[in-house]
Amino acid sequence: MVSFIPYVIPLIAIIEIFLIIKIGGIIGFWATVGIVLLTGITGVTLLRHQGFQLLNQVQQRMQNNQMPATELLEGVALLMGGLMLVTPGFLTDIVGFCLLLPPSRKLLIALVSRQLKRTIQVHSTQGFYSQSTTFNHAGPSSAGPDKPGYQAGRGGNDVFEGEFERLGEDENSHPEKK
């Protein structure tokens, strides 16, 4: 798969330059400079405020022995939004504000998370061989050797090591443990 990022970054720069020139021609040079500076200052202020709120949420989740996965994604979105607001330009300011404001940030994260859940692959490594399970919207694939869609690992090793605990059974029900 060819990455599209090397093509998108120059395109965004060209669009930003075009917008700055057009808007600067309409509202004037100093007004354009003022807007660019004002959005940068506002962005940094919002980033600080939202960042401290998010940090408190992460600490609360960790104190409750919970993984702050959503909060970490929000932290990445905040960082990206802050960087976009500090970058001069109108298009990046719009996207930056969308990433800094909680309702739009949560909506964007939900959309991206849904897309990632459809395409993510979890790899478990055993020695020199690996076994991968593809996750889709219904969870991990449950295909076995006798089912369509089954794919063995590179070495054909279908053994998964792990620990388990039987729930709902008492120790007296297993005579071999006595």
Image (cartoon, grey):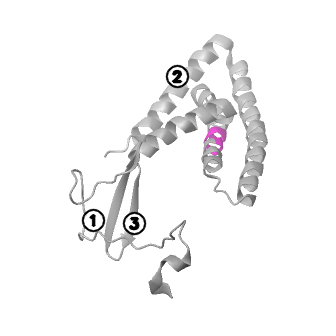
User: Disc 3 designates what residue?
Assistant: 124
Sequence-first disc among 1 and 2: 2
Q: Picture coordinates of residue 54 (x, y %)?
A: 73, 46
Using the rendered image of the protein, determine whether residue 88 is visible from the camera's viewpoint: no
- Residue 114 placement (x, y as % from top left): 48, 39
Q: CA distance from mark 1 to mark 2?
A: 51 Å
Tell whether position 80 is magenta.
yes
Nearer the observer: mark 1 or 2; the answer is 1
As helix, strand or loop, the secondary structure at mark 1 comes to loop
Element on which disc 3 rests:
strand
The answer to whether residue 100 is left or right of residue 167 is right
For label 1, the residue is: 153
Start-end of magenta stretch:
78-83
Question: Which of the two residues, 36 or 147, is positioned nearer the viewer here?
Answer: 147
Residue 120 badge = none
Q: Which is more N-terminal, label 2 or label 3? A: 2
Counting from the top left corner in percent of width and height, residue 12 is at 49, 31
> Horizontally, is 45 left or right of 2 in the view?
right
Residue type for callout 1: Gly
Q: Which residue is mark 2?
A: 18
The residue at the point 71 percent across, 24 percent down is: 35
- Give the vertical position of 42 relative to 143 (above or below): above
- The residue positioned 20% from the left and 57% from the top of the image is 146
Q: Secondary structure at mark 2?
A: helix
Q: Is residue 144 magenta?
A: no
What amino acid is found at the position of numbered circle 2 in the picture?
Phe
The reply, left or right, for residue 102 in relation to residue 14 is right
